Image (tube, rainbow, N blue to C red):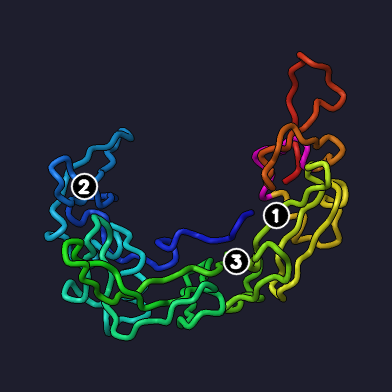
Amino acid sequence: MSRFLFAASLLVACAVSTSLLNCDYGLFETAPDGACVFECTNWDDSGGSSSHSVDPSTLTFDFIKEIAVCENVLFASVLHSSDCSGLDDLVWTSECECPYCGCSTETTATDDVYSGNGDHHVVSALVSKICLESLCVPVVTDATTDATSLVYQYEPLVSVASPRFWDEFTCPPPMCSDSQETTPGDTWFTENDAGDTEGFCYCKWDGTEQCETGFANIVASSDAVLTELYKDECEYYLAVCLNEPTRVFQRRSSYYSCGGLGCDCGENSAGETWTSTYTD
């Protein structure tokens, strides 16, 4: 199953220079001596890289938000700026990981995030937008005493990139009424009783599923979006026969993905080599 979700860090424009603290990117990691450090990595002009450790207490708020890509802080600074605008608003957990921003009223727990009690927000960038559910939940801040604090956490529900699905986008998204528990834009394959891949489906923005059975029908579907999604999903595996569905076969169990599909040799014999072109 494939989701059209983008890395949250791409959805908010970064205004901070990557030269901050002389670091291009990095991660919070536990050092051999047990200390929590931010492992900074820099690229050089030759394509190589070098790393050095930074004490987390020396990091600035903007660095944590945008260079360290602490997504919960990034989103809180946009959606709950009155609670998340500086270092004093950060809550560090007992783990060596990104901090959070504190909140005051706990969100009632629910197993179904799509109909939960959190607030829903849309965060937009130039060519993408994402629907988030914000929650206020407890995290452990001291493993010795099990002390906790309430923090903002954000659950990405669905996102779109222009132009596909842009106008249909809604937040919160509808759930498709099938057994897949899918949201709009999700795709999946269906199998026959023998376990062979035979169909391709996607969840539409009206909460219904659209499917085609048989590779010929998938490629020639009257639903152009279904065909586009199939080609996007399978191009890596089926580039030379995307437009020749009779050549597609299942070479191994696909686990509902393109990975188990392949192209036969067409009119060529085993051992021959040739070049192919296809229309994308």
Q: Secondary structure at mark 2?
A: strand
Residue 236 belongs to magenta span: yes
Kind of residue at badge 3: Ser
- The residue at 26%/65% (across/down) is 99
Residue 145 belongs to magenta span: no
Question: Taking 50 as reference, is 143 above or below it?
Answer: below
Reading the image, the residue beneath label 3 is 162
Kind of residue at badge 1: Trp
**Position in image of residue 269 (x %, y %):** 83, 17
- The residue at 29%/85% (across/down) is 104
The answer to whether 221 appears left or right of 255 in the picture is right
Kind of residue at badge 2: Thr
Q: How many marks?
A: 3
Q: Secondary structure at mark 1?
A: strand
Reading the image, the residue beneath label 1 is 188
Does the residue at mark 2 contact the one at mark 3 (Cβ under 8 Å)? no
What's drawn in magenta, residue-wise?
Answer: 232-242
Q: Nearer the viewer, residue 1 or 14?
A: 1
Reading the image, the residue beneath label 2 is 30
Which numbered disc flags the more N-terminal residue, 3 or 1? 3
CA separation in Å, label 2 and label 3 = 39 Å
Residue furthest front as drawn:
145
Single out the mark in the foreground, 2 or 3.
Answer: 2
Residue furthest top as drawn:
271
The dominant secondary structure in magenta is helix
**Position in image of residue 146 (x %, y %):** 22, 67
